[in-house]
């Protein structure tokens, strides 16, 4: 949404463009709700959102070439996808951590996310000063980050979709498909049946 006011569309003011882009948050939240309820695992759902992010970031490069017929719908869609990503990611993070550290771990993740949202406009402006075409490099870097997420997600070891949350201090996680149990806290018996 930060680049939308750049578009010189006579029929919509920058405030109107911002209002329209904010309206796309509701469909994004509905997409997140559907993904949470879908039979896909959390990993596959996040990969689907990252794939959409990758495609939309590539489409957003067209702003530098005044292809507003591509850029404007892509930017509105990106707002919806980012909203879905936001909702879905926080739901996933709340289920991954054991109860004994859930609030601290979730708070830490939210803090890191806020640091990212604060630094994104600064990075956007910095990249604009480096590159003659102000937006292409930023959107390429964003697409590369999304592609990196698509490649990394299959290696995230623990899928919690449809499994009960851990309510004990002796919570363990299954490590990378090898079937070994690794205690998160010292003193957990090796043969504990408490798995993710």
Image: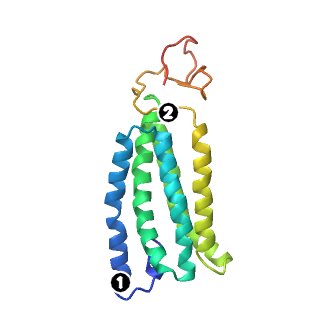
Residue 11 vs 165, above or below: the answer is: below
User: Label 1: which residue?
Assistant: 13
Number of numbered markers: 2
Q: Are marks 1 and 2 in contact (CB under 8 Å)?
A: no
Vertical position of residue 145 compared to residue 186: above or below:
below
Question: Where residue 142 appears, x then y in whole percent?
Answer: 58, 62
Measuring 64% from the left and 78% from the top, which residue is drawn there?
129
For the residues labelled 1 and 2, the Cα–Cα distance comes to: 45 Å
Q: Which residue is mark 2?
A: 159
Is 130 left or right of 162, judged from the image as shown? right
Q: Is residue 126 visible?
A: no
Residue 113 location (% of width, % of height): 50, 52
N-term mark: 1 or 2:
1
Outermost residue, bottom side: 10
| Comparing labels 1 and 2, the label whose residue is closer to the camera | 2
Mark number, residue 52: none
Position of residue 157 relative to residue 170, above or below, is below
Where is 163 relative to 113, above or below?
above
Disc 1 element? loop
Whole-percent x and y of residue 166? Answer: 43, 25
Nearer-the-camera pick, 107 or 26: 26
Within 10 angstroms of label 2, few (less than 14), some, or many (20 or more) residues? some
Q: Coloured how?
A: rainbow
Horizontal relation, residue 167 to residue 180: left or right: left
Residue at 47 percent across and 34 percent down: it is 96
Q: Position of residue 67 (x, y in %)?
A: 51, 80
Q: State the quadrant of the N terminus.
A: bottom left
Q: Quadrant of residue 181?
A: top right
């Amino acid at each position: 949404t930060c680049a939308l006011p750049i578009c010189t569309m006579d029929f919509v003011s920058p405030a109107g463009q911002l209002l329209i882009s904010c309206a796309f948050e509701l469909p994004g939240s509905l997409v997140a709700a559907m993904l949470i309820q879908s039979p896909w695992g959390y990993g596959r759902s996040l990969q689907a959102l990252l794939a959409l992010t990758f495609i939309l970031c590539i489409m957003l490069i067209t702003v530098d070439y005044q292809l507003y017929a591509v850029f404007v719908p892509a930017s509105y869609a990106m707002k919806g996808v980012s909203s879905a990503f936001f909702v879905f990611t926080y739901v996933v993070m709340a289920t991954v951590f054991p109860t004994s550290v859930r609030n601290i771990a979730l708070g830490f993740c939210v803090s890191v996310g806020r640091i990212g949202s604060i630094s994104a406009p600064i990075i956007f402006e910095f990249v604009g000063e480096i590159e003659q075409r102000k937006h292409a490099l930023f959107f390429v870097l964003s697409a590369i980050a999304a592609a990196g997420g698509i490649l990394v997600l299959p290696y995230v070891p623990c899928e919690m979709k449809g499994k009960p949350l851990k309510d004990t201090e002796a919570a363990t996680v299954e490590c990378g498909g090898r079937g070994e149990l690794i205690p998160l806290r010292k003193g957990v018996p090796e043969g504990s049946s408490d798995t993710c």
